[in-house]
Image (cartoon, rainbow, N blue to C red):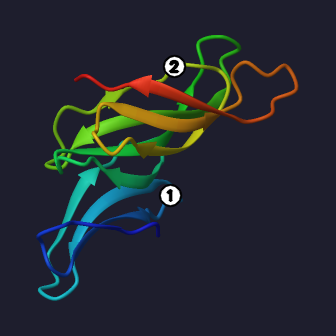
Amino acid sequence: MTPCLVPGEEHTFFCTRYTDKKECEIWKVNYETGVEEIILSQEGRSFTSPRLSPDGQWLLVTGNSISERGKRQNTDLFVVRTDGTNFTQITYHPGNDISAIWAPDGKSIYFLSQRGSAAGRYNVWRMDFNL
């Protein structure tokens, strides 16, 4: 699901795959050679919608998390290097954060969030990216 092409690596993409426990992982796949590499997996969590940073170094993903306020499950945004290292949660809000994209210069991330809306409506938000 949700393939994200890798510029300069012909026949290669990042994607989301379900596990047998119905959790989602992020994979890198070369469909010509058949080489598959797991990038991000964590038991009890799902990660979807990989988006490659403009510099090709980071993946921006949506994942489920447990909010500190209310202790309920919701979605937040995470980044991980394309080699699977430096996994970092970048939003921590009890409202759902989804549909994230990189700004063309890679210095900002735009996303939809329910934060700031008592009725739970989604609005567009921007945050700086400086890891």
Left or right: 108, with 98 as reference point: left
Q: How many marks?
A: 2
Rendered residue at 16%/38% (across/down): 85
Residue beneath disc 1: 21
Rendered residue at 25%/22% (across/down): 130
- Percent of width and height locating residue 9: 12, 72
- Percent of width and height locating residue 74: 63, 32
Residue beneath disc 2: 92
Question: Taking 4 as reference, is 130 above or below it?
Answer: above
Q: Which corner quadrant of the image does residue 43 belong to?
A: top left
Left or right: 33, with 78 as reference point: left
Rendered residue at 73%/18% (across/down): 116
User: What's the amino acid at mark 1?
Assistant: Lys
Q: Which residue lies furthest to the top in this view?
A: 69
- Front position in the image: 108 or 65: 108
Say whether disc 2 or disc 1 marks the residue closer to the N-terminus. 1
- Percent of width and height locating residue 106: 28, 38
User: What's the amino acid at mark 2?
Assistant: Tyr
Q: Which corner quadrant of the image does residue 30 belong to?
A: bottom left
